[in-house]
Amino acid sequence: METVSVRIIVLRACALGAVAAALWASSLRAQEPAAGARAEPVRGDTLVLSLAEAQRLALRQNPAFLAEGQEAEIARGELRQARIYSFNPQLELEAPGAGGGDNNELRLFQEVEWAGQRGLRIRAAEAALRRAQHSVRDAARLTLADVSHAFYAALAASRRLEVAEQILGLNEQLLEAVRIQAREGEISQLEANLMELEFGRARARVLAARREATAAELDLKRLVGITPDRPVQLAAEVPPAPDPSTLDQDSLLRAALSRRPDLAARSVAVEESRTLGRLARREAIPNLRIGALAQLGDESGELRLGPAIGLSLPIWNRNQGLVARREAEARQAAFERSAAELRIRKEVADAYRAYIAASEEERVFERDVLEPARENQRLLTTAYQAGKIDLPALLLLRNQLLDAELGYWETWLERRKALVDLESATAALDTPGAGTTRDTNDQR
């Protein structure tokens, strides 16, 4: 009997030693990925995705962003058309008898804009191109924010899955030891059933974590523009999060107002609308029709040449409705710019406060929750071997550590999401020139 007890004690110590060692390794691995950490080499066609690579691929092959990028090409085509003279020459031929006369008449006319309409039309098209380019840059800003959110969510989900799988492995090892203890009468059947229950919970936790990790990875693949069946591995390297004490809200707001492409697009839209309003007034001025008339008499064969001029009389249609519409559109564009500025101010304030709060939450959680839980885990082996705690207490303390590890990654993710929102609000994620690589003077 004494030999059996010694054997059980040895099994118990070995199992707890494995538990402690594995949990300590889990604690060391469950740290925020360090900047500059290198990903392990991957074989086959697995794509290693860092945050920077995911952002680069998204701007190159995300279909939604590429569709937005065509707005600049559309505006560039409109500008090219605006630079082309709008009116082609008109040639008219009148045969004998067509008008009751006996002469052949040839008329050549050219309609001429003389009140500066073409210049205003070009200026409006140039403004529309600049507005479209700013809109594409804003689409790039939003796309990069979405990709960053998805990358951090997928990385955190993969870390939570690793923690859940490690706990499952520990429970499996402890379950084997508990079954031996139950057969030898060292523990009650109630405690053995409690361990069986805890093992089932651990398996269910792994399945849920794997489902969440898969969903987060699929969302990242969609934003990056790769197929769902393409295997990927997330690189651990992430840029360091700035110290909240180094951030100044007023400086962030000034940077946002000077860099936000959506605000710039609204400003250009005001200019475009006002130019279109001036064009509508100029288009009410009638164009001249200047030409030449050639007449050939049937009997004499004499060719007579003469000038011709025409002018429409703006009695009824003077673009009254179009002018009123353009004026309203200009006022609307000005209001929309003011609304965009107010929205940006709110976004910067919200993102700044959220980042400050998330940073403090992560710091408090790591200091006041995670570190004490890890310290308890280090003391767990000695206490259990000495018989100072029973199996329910062991499971309780280990679940506290599990909750602490999983909760840490939740707070880590919240801080990263708040950082992305702050960078997006201040246009720090903006990619200058995205989708607008050609100058407006390229298309003549």
Image: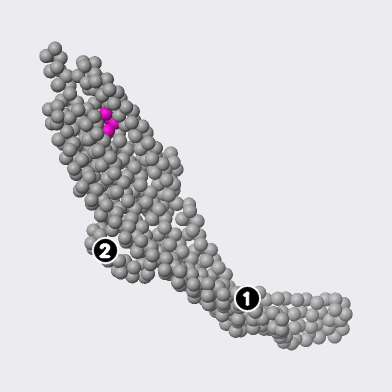
Residue depicted at x 14% and y 35%: 379
Q: Secondary structure at mark 1?
A: helix
Q: Quick check: 150 above or below 264?
A: above
Image mark for residue 322? 1
Q: What amino acid type should be assigned to the residue bearing mark 2?
A: Leu
285 sits to left or right of 28: right
Q: Quick check: 272 above or below 431?
A: below
- Decide: few, some or many residues near mark 1? Use Cα within 10 Å; few <14, some 14-19, many ≥20: some
Residue depicted at x 65% and y 78%: 319
User: Magenta span covers which residues?
Assistant: 167-171
Residue 147, percent across and down? 39, 52
Of marks 2 and 1, the one in the foreground: 2
Q: What amino acid type should be assigned to the residue bearing mark 1?
A: Leu
Q: Quadrant of the N terminus?
A: top left
191 sits to left or right of 350: left
Q: Nearer the viewer, residue 266 or 374?
A: 374
Q: Secondary structure at mark 2?
A: loop
Q: What residue does disc 2 label?
A: 247
Residue at mark 2 to residue at mark 1: CA–CA distance: 49 Å
